[in-house]
Structures are given as structure tokens and as C-alpha cells.
């Protein structure tokens, strides 16, 4: 019985290793940031404490991030007073997009479980000309692997945390297919 027991454990282990036959996907390095430290904003939102490269480089401040999240939270409560209680833990990715491996897609926000959301810190702009160096935190050229659409330069731009309200509505009502009429209020 002892030797057969090891075989029972060994075979599934081999099969698990065989599930990932595809080459390593470089997009996986751009997954959502998962917070390890938390900060409470003046309005009571709980958000990722960073540190963020964009703050260190002077493109924004922690106070700007706090203000953006508090403003979005207050606006959400005005639009949906019945869901004013929603106050998820906010994981912030210091980019305008992150890669969601399970969906094999780029996103600016996602619901990641009970009362936790992941949100890109920055909004995105697309232009036909390259933004000047130093004018934005991140810029990417046309046709790179970080985009869904292959036209124009993409770079970060204010406002901050653009998907916050969208993800809060997911926390409140679920609705992964976006079939609720509430989505039109955002």
C-alpha cells in the first residue's frame, strides 16, 4: 500500500506540470498589483499604500490618490444611496491597465473576491503622436503587446482610479454580464 500511495500523489503532480505547455506569457508580468500594506483615506476608503513609482517620480501624490478615491466613493454613494455602504479594499496597479490571466485580457479594474477590487491607478489616453518625454508616467508606442487596439500612442493621464465606481457596483450587485440598468448610471 505504501508504494501505491506515492504513485497516487506522483501522477497528479506530473499532470499538473503538463497543463502549462504554452510558453511563458510575458503579459503575466503585468498582472494586477496585490497590496501588502493599507492606507485609510480621509473619507474612510481603504486603499493600497504602495509605494508607487509614479508618486516617487512626482507625477502624483498620495494625497491626490486619496482625494480621487474619496471623490469617486462619494459620487458612487450619490448615484446609488442604497449601496453607500460599499467600501472595498482597493488594490492599485501603477499603470493604466493590467493583465488578467484567467480572462486572457487587459483590464483597468476587476472584482477580486469578497470586498476586494483591483483598479489601475491611471486613466489612459491615445494619441497619434508620441507624448513628450516626462509628460506622463507611462507611454507605450503603437502596436506593442500591452494593448487591445493597435493604433496610436497610449499613455497615462488623470483622472486617477478610473474604474473604482464600476468595480464598486460589481461589489454591490455582482452582475458579471453587466445586464443591470444600474450600469447606465456610471
Image (tube, rainbow, N blue to C red):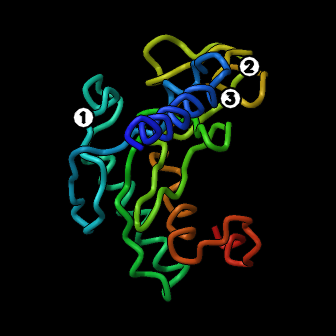
Looking at the image, which is closer to me, 146 or 114? 114
- In the shown orientation, is residue 12 left or right of residue 91? right
- In the shown orientation, is residue 39 left or right of residue 88? left
**Residue at image mark 3:** 126
Badge 3 element: strand
Residue 31 x %, y %: 50, 34
Camera-side mark, 2 or 1: 1
Indicate whether 121 appears above or below 75. Answer: above
Residue 127 x %, y %: 69, 24
Residue 43 x %, y %: 27, 68
Position of the N terminus, as image quadrant, is top left
Do the residues under discs 3 and 1 have CB atoms within 8 angstroms?
Answer: no
Q: Residue furthest bottom?
A: 82
The Cα–Cα distance between marks 3 and 2, rounded to whole angstroms, is 7 Å
Q: Can you tell which mark lies on residue 128? A: 2
Residue 124 x %, y %: 59, 36
Indicate whether 169 appears above or below 101. Answer: below
Badge 2 element: loop
Crowd rating for badge 2 (residues with CA inside 10 Å; few <14, some 14–19, many 20+): few
**What residue lies at 47% left-to-right and 48% top-to-bottom?**
119
Position of the C terminus, as image quadrant, is bottom right
Do the residues under discs 3 and 2 have CB atoms within 8 angstroms?
Answer: no
Looking at the image, which is closer to me, 3 or 92? 3
Looking at the image, which is closer to me, 129 or 35? 35
Crowd rating for badge 1 (residues with CA inside 10 Å; few <14, some 14–19, many 20+): few
Crowd rating for badge 3 (residues with CA inside 10 Å; few <14, some 14–19, many 20+): some
- In the shown orientation, is residue 179 left or right of residue 31? right
Q: Which of marks 3 and 1 is nearer the N terminus?
A: 1
Q: Can you tell which mark lies on residue 101? A: none
Indicate whether 52 appears above or below 175. Answer: above
Q: Can you tell which mark lies on residue 51? A: 1
**What residue lies at 58% left-to-right and 17% top-to-bottom?**
131
Amino acid at each position: 500500500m505504501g508504494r501505491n500511495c506515492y504513485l497516487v500523489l506522483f501522477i497528479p503532480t506530473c499532470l499538473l506540470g503538463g497543463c502549462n505547455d504554452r510558453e511563458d506569457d510575458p503579459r503575466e508580468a503585468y498582472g494586477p498589483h496585490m497590496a501588502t500594506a493599507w492606507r485609510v483615506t480621509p473619507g474612510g476608503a481603504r486603499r493600497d499604500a504602495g509605494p508607487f513609482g509614479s508618486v516617487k517620480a512626482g507625477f502624483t501624490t498620495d494625497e491626490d490618490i486619496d482625494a480621487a478615491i474619496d471623490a469617486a466613493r462619494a459620487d458612487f454613494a450619490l448615484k446609488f444611496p442604497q449601496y453607500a455602504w460599499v467600501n472595498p479594499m482597493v488594490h492599485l496597479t501603477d499603470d493604466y491597465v493590467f493583465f488578467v490571466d484567467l480572462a486572457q485580457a487587459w483590464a483597468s479594474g476587476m472584482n477580486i473576491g469578497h470586498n476586494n477590487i483591483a483598479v489601475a491607478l491611471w486613466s489612459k489616453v491615445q494619441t497619434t503622436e508620441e507624448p513628450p518625454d516626462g509628460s506622463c508616467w507611462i507611454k507605450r508606442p503603437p502596436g506593442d503587446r500591452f494593448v487591445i487596439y493597435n493604433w496610436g500612442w497610449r499613455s497615462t493621464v488623470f483622472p486617477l482610479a478610473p474604474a473604482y465606481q464600476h468595480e464598486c457596483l460589481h461589489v454591490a450587485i455582482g452582475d458579471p454580464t453587466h445586464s443591470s440598468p444600474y450600469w447606465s448610471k456610471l
